[in-house]
Amino acid sequence: MARPKTAAGIPHLRRQGAATQLIVDGKPMVLLSGEVHNSSASSLPYMEPIWPRMAAMGLNALVVPVYWELVEPREGTFDFRLVDGLLAGARKQRLRLVLLWFGTWKNGESHYAPEWVKTDLARFPRAQTAPGCNSATILCLSDEARDADARALAALMRHLRRVDGRRHTVVAVQVENETGLLGGSRDRSALGDRRFAGRVPAALMRFLARRRDALTDEFRRLWPDAGGRQAGTWTEVFGPAADEVFMAWHIGRYVDRVAEAGKREYPLPMYANTWLVGHDGQRPGEYPSGGPVAGMLNVWQAAAPHIDWIAPDIYRNDFAATCRQYTQSGNPLMIPETHRDERAAANVFYAVGQHDAMCFAPFAIDDLDASHPLAASYALLADLAPLVTAHQGTGRMVGLAQEGGEMVREFDLGGYHLRVQYARPVEPGRVPGCAIIIATGPDEFIVAGCGLTVRFSGLGPEAPNVNFLALDEGRFVRGKWVPGRRLNGDESYPGVVLGSEPCVCRARLYAYA
Ligand code: DGJ
């Protein structure tokens, strides 16, 4: 793709070992963030008190919508005053922004399409959940709708390049919001039926064949279950999953064309978010069919090469399992939406420490203030950020967030065996035990978090004794370790003890026979 002329070093992605990092102004950045309510960013006066409150909470970025209907109220007439106001509000508080393009899709329907789109069903047809039965979702097979959406995002990106191409306040763009079709597993319009009767595009089959060894567990189950065929109609190749794969391919293609048009103007990182399958056994259509759920991740990767990653909106209770699903097939982790209760204060440690998450953003963050425990987690992680980003993708960092029923976790790291004992069972209203543990050098560890104790021992059958050379509490200030108390007495007896408030310890170990 031709790169537009713009300031060098616009936000982009970079690989470091096994990790993908978001590079902002030349440095890797972890977005300690939150997403505002859907309507907040439609009013600049409403946002006014929110900006300083978010900065006081320790956020370094805010996730905010941009609404197609408000930027293009009449076809071809664009109004970016709201966007400019969001940039100004963020800059004043030194916050970065992730913009959500509320275009054709918002939660599986088309609520934010402009009036001139919503009311012209001849030009912008709807997906049909039964023949003749129009849904509230614009049809993903409509080239007119796709091109109109693409022109609008392109105009937004052109504007951003002009007003932000040097400041880099906006670091990423989400294209659409929770795509898919509700109320049916597939579009049943006459056009949809005709396309569905055709053959699976060769491009999709080639992609799947090439990536055969790197497909997600979910897709690996689904494809062979249907017979594992390499060519044929959607039903012949994908069997019972045919409707959903068909929708995922066509929605992915649509979103890709919108993203491509945007990137041609200003190639910021772009991603698509996901309304997850709510529970085992839930059927496509009960959740938006064709959205990038875990089983459709590979189909989206094939359909949408201009989408840099797929991001899960995690409201399910199995936070860790969902993070694992969305790091399959080389997908980097970003969490643009999740619960905003006390679990968020722990889950951010897991997402960032274990999976190199580029962004953690509880939803409805604008309801919160600095008294929320997330603020203390963000403060600690902000201090730790240079160390964390230096160790991403190296295999020398672990993230923990206690899960319901879990009291002990054991694993090996940096040549030692670690036994983590949580302080108490997970209870509503209390931050679960959580930590980032980094093997920073031979026999040296940084342990940061709360609500647990870490005990170190040697590896192997003839493991030597292990003890502390020195255990210090302290903090990182601009990347440099500033020690506090030396803890070699009673405080180190059970191991590295992290109390109920987030704190950082540095342990230097030695082994003896
Ligand atoms: C997920 C959507 O992506 C958000 O825009 C918002 O509607 C939340 N759900 C509400 O919980």
Image (cartoon, rainbow, N blue to C red):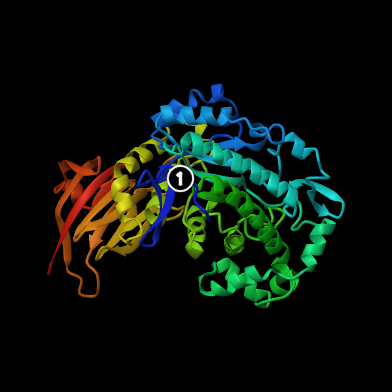
Who is closer to the viewer here, 376 or 169?
169
Q: Is mark 1 within 8 Å of ligand 1?
A: no
Who is closer to the viewer here, 441 or 63?
63
Residue 159 location (% of width, % of height): 55, 36
Q: Residue at x 48, y 60 (%)?
A: 327
Residue 291 location (% of width, % of height): 64, 54
Quarter of the image for the C terminus: give it.
Answer: bottom left
| Type of amino acid under label 1 | Phe
Q: Quadrant of residue 370?
A: top left
Q: Residue at x 57, y 51 (%)?
A: 272
Who is closer to the viewer here, 412 or 188?
188
Q: Residue at x 77, y 69 (%)?
A: 198
Q: Residue at x 16, y 65 (%)?
A: 465
Residue that label 1 marks: 360
Left or right side of 164 for 135: right
Left or right side of 388 for 430: right
Residue 165 visible here: yes
Q: Quadrant of residue 502?
A: top left
| Residue lying farthest to the right in this orientation | 132
| Residue lying farthest to the top in this orientation | 45
Residue 315 visible here: no
Residue 321 location (% of width, % of height): 50, 58
Who is closer to the viewer here, 29 or 339?
29
Circle 1 — which element? strand
Residue 149 location (% of width, % of height): 67, 44
The count of marks equals 1
**Above or below, 296 relative to 103:** below
